[in-house]
Amino acid sequence: MSSNLIARLLKSDHGAVAPTVGISLFALVAAGGIAFDYARMATLDTELQNAADQAALAAATQLDGKANARSRATSAAQTLVTNQTLMANDVGTRAISVPTVTFYVDKPRTTVATTDADANFVLVTVGTREAFFALTPIVAAISSGPIAASAYAGLGTAICKVPPVMMCNPAEPMNNTNPDFDFDANALRGVGMKLITGNASAPGNFGFLETGFGNGAQDLARALGYNTPPGDCMPSDGVSTKPGLNASVMDALNTRFDLDTNGSQTCPGGGTCSPSRNVRKDLVRGNQCGTSGQQGWQESPNPYRPTTTTPITSGYPDIMGHPRDLCHAISNDLSASISAGCSSGAGRIGNGQWDRNAYFQVNYGWNASTWPTMTGLSSSATRYEVYQWEIANPANIDTPQSVGGNKSGYGAPVCRGAGITPGGTNVDRRRISAAVLNCRALGLNGSETNVPVLKWIDLFLVEPSYQRRDGSTTVTEATDVYVELIGETNSGAAGATAGQVVRRDVPYLIE
């Protein structure tokens, strides 16, 4: 009986798979362990990379070029976002550290930034963590693995609701080859500047940018004339230049001064071209709003015509707008302006010396010792400050000034509605922002795309573009644009033009 049982057992093939399972168990445990531990490692890598990404984005938000930008960015990377890891089991804390923050000037990372102003990109590296494996060591495989992560980010900026205007850097040397040659607009606050529009084949010293919604002069007139320029935001670091000059474009710009050159056609259809609440200017009119004919806008019979850079003390004009710097007011010739003291920027940049005393004497009857007391303004007040004071105290600008011949000068709008009082969400129609380009270094000629912008600056429109004459001598051209420098366009703020100038800064990951 027993011998038969033993014989049957020897011949039976039931359970023959057991040895195979036993032999393969080692490999099965190894495969499962590796899969389990790899998933832990991959999750830890994801946690660290997410932490690096968020830290880099947080740091990039602080790269505004201002003082302490790098220290603020470092602090943001290390403390603004709290990241934790759940998969590292290296006996450390769960908090992920950010020990290394490096700043670069350029996107390819060829130049390390040494100042806050040139820190444009940031590389963040998080602290290395280690994943100790749970099952892999059973099969004598690796027992742990160090993991690190880094991220590279920058700050993408765009400027919105601004006229598409550019100007060549007036401080750029004649043979400049540096596209980053600086122009310190803040240091020139209150200084007058003559912008020259150029010709039909090049941007000139002052010109226009592509609008983003059309290419014709009519579209450009819409962008310059409408209260809210149509189209999308423009990148602050790369724009497209638009050559040429058209009278309708300048007419649209002049609507900000209440000039109605071509009647209803001055403002292109589809939008509103309102004047500023304060349109003080050196032009008078009868009963018409155009710029032709005896009853339309024209120069006053006794205009402001200084012959020296010394403020006048007698022979005052019968009406006076916000005037040019004296070194520009005595001549439209830049070489004469240089001799008169407009020595910067080949004569295009003034010195901030304008005839304040004559302005207040003509428009208010206040002499040099009276007007600072009456206004509370400094004796060196800028034209923009005077303009703002007049808006806050409108009694004088609301009173027409008769000059005889049934003609009067007006400080308040009379042709294109009541005008817009700047502030809050209201636009300032006598303030524009312009992109500054180093035209010589960039070799600009006609239409160019992705042109690097040195900076955006804010400008006060001093006078309408109008051909003024003294007999046969041209005093100003109809294509001249004269402005006063307010300063650089600030990130996220626009002062009195909050409804007009919006700059958006958005951090983005590069790698």
Image (cartoon, rainbow, N blue to C red):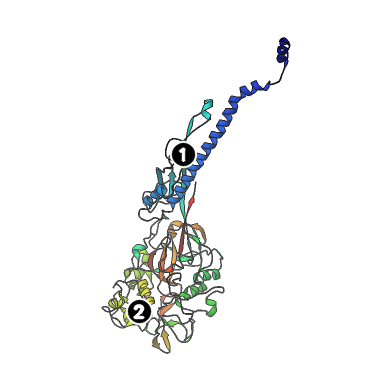
Q: Position of residue 98 (x, y in %)?
A: 41, 44
Q: Image check: 71 left or right of 43?
A: left
Residue at 42 percent across and 87 percent down: it is: 407
Crowd rating for badge 2 (residues with CA inside 10 Å; few <14, some 14–19, many 20+) = some
Q: Position of residue 420 (x, y in %)?
A: 45, 75
In this rendering, the answer to whether 399 lies above or below 382 is: below
Magenta stretch encompasses residue 416: yes
Depth check: 270 or 41 in front?
Answer: 41
Label 2, secondary structure: give it: loop
Label 1, secondary structure: give it: loop
Q: Image check: 210 left or right of 190?
A: right
Depth check: 131 or 421 in front?
Answer: 131
Question: What's the mark number on residue 441?
Answer: none
**Residue type at numbered disc 2:** Arg
Sequence order check, earlier mark of 2 and 1 = 1
**Residue type at numbered disc 1:** Ala
Mark 2 vs mark 1: in front: 1
Mark 2, residue position: 305
Q: Please identify the quarter of the rendering in which residue 307 is found.
A: bottom left
Q: Look at the image and give the residue range highlighted in magenta.
A: 414-419
Q: Image check: 31 left or right of 238?
A: right
Image quadrant occupied by the N terminus: top right
Mark 1, residue position: 148
- Mark 2 in CB contact with mark 1 (< 8 angstroms): no
Magenta stretch encompasses residue 54: no
Residue 24 visible within the image:
yes
Q: Please identify the quarter of the rendering in which residue 270 is found.
A: bottom right
Depth check: 430 or 179 in front?
Answer: 430
